[in-house]
């Protein structure tokens, strides 16, 4: 059985989304995918298409770049929700110059009250070099703060490296 909130963290192309998708599918609950990415260019479209190709018609997909509350508040206990990913959600808010503290607080609140188990995917961005520009450094700090808050609230935290899961908090279902 999936915990109320699971957090799957890893680097880019680490296998974290595939791992998270399998968590949802193995729950045997109705899978719902909240896609947070906006399509900026052909590279992003190709990446989104790869993610879409892994999901069959048993998945309900909802595109939500900013406000996840409508989906989370309507969720039922027989669903399992995958948010892929917190990094793109944060990027969207940063690029629109939204108040990140308010957006993060709302997301954490919405996750607490969701009736369905939620798995949220995010990138670990703090293990690389210090970025050379202010926006990238601001993003890295904001992503780190968001990841810390999500991990603290989650019952299970899994870091995925090279496709291999490492449970950091809680136990695997």
Image (spheres, grey):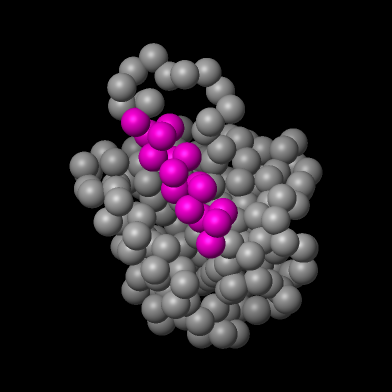
Estimate the x, y position of residue 160 in percent, counting from the top left: 70, 44
**Residue at coordinates 41% horizontally, 81% vertically from top-left?**
74
Q: In which quarter of the image is the N terminus?
A: bottom right
Q: Which residue lies furthest to the front in this view?
A: 152
Q: Establish if 30 lies above or below 12.
A: below
Q: Is residue 35 left or right of residue 64?
A: right
**Residue at coordinates 30% horizontally, 56% vertically from top-left?**
103
Residue 55 seen in render: no
Q: Establish if 2 lies above or below 128.
A: below
Q: Establish if 108 lies above or below 133.
A: below
Estimate the x, y position of residue 59 in percent, counting from the top left: 57, 70
Check if residue 62 falls in the magenta segment. no
Magenta: main secondary structure equals: helix
Which region shows up in magenta? 138-153
**Residue at coordinates 39% horizontally, 40% vertically from top-left?**
142
Estimate the x, y position of residue 71 in percent, counting from the top left: 40, 73
Q: Residue furthest bottom?
A: 77
Q: Quadrant of the C terminus?
A: bottom right
Estimate the x, y position of residue 68 in percent, counting from the top left: 37, 65
Q: Establish if 19 lies above or below 72.
A: above
**Residue at coordinates 34% horizontally, 18% vertically from top-left?**
133
Residue 117 seen in render: yes
Q: In this view, does 30 lie to the left or right of 83?
A: right
Check if residue 148 falls in the magenta segment. yes
């Amino acid at each position: 059985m999936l915990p109320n909130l699971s957090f799957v963290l890893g680097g880019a192309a680490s296998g974290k989304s595939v791992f998270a998708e399998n968590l949802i599918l193995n729950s045997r609950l109705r899978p719902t995918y909240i896609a947070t990415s906006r399509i900026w260019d052909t590279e992003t479209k190709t990446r989104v298409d790869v993610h879409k190709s892994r999901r069959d018609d048993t998945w309900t997909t909802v595109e939500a770049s900013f406000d996840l509350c409508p989906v989370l508040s309507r969720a039922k206990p027989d669903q399992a929700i995958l948010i892929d990913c917190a990094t793109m959600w944060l990027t969207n808010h940063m690029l629109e110059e939204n108040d990140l503290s308010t957006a993060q607080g709302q997301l954490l609140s919405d996750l607490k009250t969701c009736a369905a188990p939620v798995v949220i995917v995010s990138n670990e961005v703090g293990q690389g070099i210090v970025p050379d520009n202010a926006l990238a450094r601001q993003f890295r700090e904001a992503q780190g703060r968001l990841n810390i808050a999500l991990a603290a609230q989650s019952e299970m935290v899994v870091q995925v490296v090279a496709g291999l899961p490492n449970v950091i908090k809680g136990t695997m279902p």
